Image (tube, helix red, strand yellow):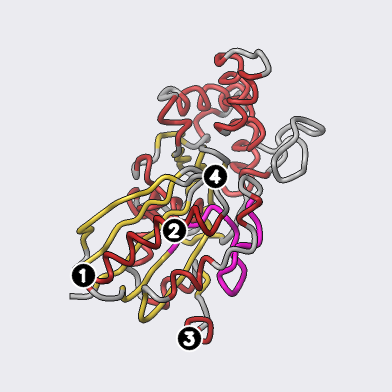
């Protein structure tokens, strides 16, 4: 039996699942220690995968849902939340574990694929609210690749984001922004009111562009604040007075807290042609 691997590289953990015969047969995760050098921090993941491959052989395909941005060779070229990871050859480090295809996409894109597949909708917006803010756009039955929804401007000349700009959604609706707000003396409720308002501002613009039928929210913020989707929905209705019936429903991700991992697993189970419409693939010469 062939095995494929779905891998989620997030801001605070590295999680993975093994797919065999169309079902998940194993899952595991290790924390991501942001205080360590990148090569040292990723070593626990490599050790676990080495042990797995020693038991069952190399994976037929490996798909990464990646918070950091990888270049065409699988090297991390951008990660505002962990800038010291830039330059890490993540793809080449994982290439020895796979015999056919190593592919990756943005973790928000992976989560979007997971939710759109589960809900069976033609148009959907996904936001992953965690250490940072990611997301994706599913419209007319397909994914728009590599959309940085967390870096849409919701407050001109607003809070400084880790990307260097001011006023990004990530500067208001991430766990880092919550920690910064409370460290500066603000209350959790004040942060929550502002975070849901800024999320609604972002979504009202995305709604005008793509007319999604549903918005799904995943990540640690939703786990910490279960009312977040309902609070955002109320803010949306305030912004769109007079026509609330045309607004999308805002709900928690049906894929749960591990939406990015579920998306990576879904992609790992697809054909190479299906993955190619969503993912980048490590060139064969890079695996030699």
- View extreme (right): residue: 157
Mark 1 vs mark 2: which is more N-terminal? 2
SS class, disc 2: helix
- Report whether residue 119 is seen: yes
Asked where in the image residue 147 lies, by quadrant, the reply is: bottom right
92 on left or right of 46: right
Q: Is residue 201 above or below residue 253?
A: above
Residue carrying label 1:
55
Q: Are marks 1 and 3 in contact (CB under 8 Å)?
A: no
Q: Are marks 2 and 4 in contact (CB under 8 Å)?
A: no
Crowd rating for badge 1 (residues with CA inside 10 Å; few <14, some 14–19, many 20+): few
Q: Earlier in the sequence, mark 3 or mark 2?
A: 2
Mark 1 vs 4: CB contact within 8 A: no
Q: Which mark is residue 104?
A: none
Q: Name the quadrant containing residue 199.
A: top right
Residue 151 lies, with reference to residue 25, above or below; the image says above
Mark 4 neighbour class, 10 Å CA radius: few under 14, some 14 to 19, many 20 or more? some
Q: Which residue is mark 2?
A: 43
Quadrant location of residue 20? bottom left
User: Distance between the Cα atoms at labels 1 and 3?
Assistant: 23 Å
Q: Position of residue 151 (x, y in %)?
A: 67, 44
User: What span is colored magenta in the figure?
Assistant: 64-79
x, y (%) of residue 25? 20, 59
- Which residue, given by chain and number where applicable, does mark 4 sit on? 34
Q: Is residue 102 left or right of residue 203?
A: left
Name the element at disc 4: loop
Which residue is identified by label 3? 288
The residue positioned 56% from the left and 20% from the top of the image is 192
Give yes or no for contact between labels 1 and 2 (Cβ–Cβ under 8 Å): no
Disc 3 and disc 2: Cα gap in Å? 21 Å
Residue at the image position 37 percent from the left and 51 percent from the top:
15
First of labels 1, 3 by sequence position: 1
């Amino acid at each position: 039996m062939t095995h494929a691997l779905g891998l989620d590289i997030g801001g605070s953990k590295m999680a993975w699942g093994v797919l065999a015969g169309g079902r998940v047969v194993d899952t595991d995760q290790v924390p991501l220690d942001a205080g360590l050098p990148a090569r040292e921090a990723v070593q626990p993941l490599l050790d676990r995968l080495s042990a797995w491959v020693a038991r069952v052989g190399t994976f037929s395909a490996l798909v990464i849902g990646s918070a950091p941005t990888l270049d065409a060779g699988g090297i991390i070229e951008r990660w505002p939340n962990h800038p010291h990871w830039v330059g890490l050859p993540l793809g080449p480090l994982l290439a020895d574990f796979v015999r056919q295809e190593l592919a990756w996409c943005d973790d928000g894109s992976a989560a979007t694929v997971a939710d759109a597949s589960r809900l069976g909708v033609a148009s959907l917006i996904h936001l992953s609210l965690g250490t940072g803010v990611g997301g994706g756009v599913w419209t007319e039955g397909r994914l728009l690749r590599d959309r940085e929804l967390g870096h849409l401007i919701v407050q001109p000349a607003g809070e400084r984001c880790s990307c260097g700009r001011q006023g990004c959604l990530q500067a208001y609706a991430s766990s880092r922004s919550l920690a910064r707000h409370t460290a500066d003396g603000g209350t959790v409720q004040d942060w929550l009111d502002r975070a849901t308002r800024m999320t609604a501002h972002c979504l009202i613009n995305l709604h005008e562009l793509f007319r999604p039928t549903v918005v799904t929210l995943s990540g640690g913020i939703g786990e910490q604040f279960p009312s977040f989707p309902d609070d955002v929905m109320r803010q949306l209705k305030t912004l769109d007075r007079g026509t609330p019936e045309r607004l999308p429903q805002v709900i928690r991700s049906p894929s749960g807290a591990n939406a990015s991992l579920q998306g990576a697993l879904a992609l790992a189970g697809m054909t190479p042609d299906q993955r190619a419409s969503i993912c980048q693939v490590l060139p064969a010469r890079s695996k030699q």
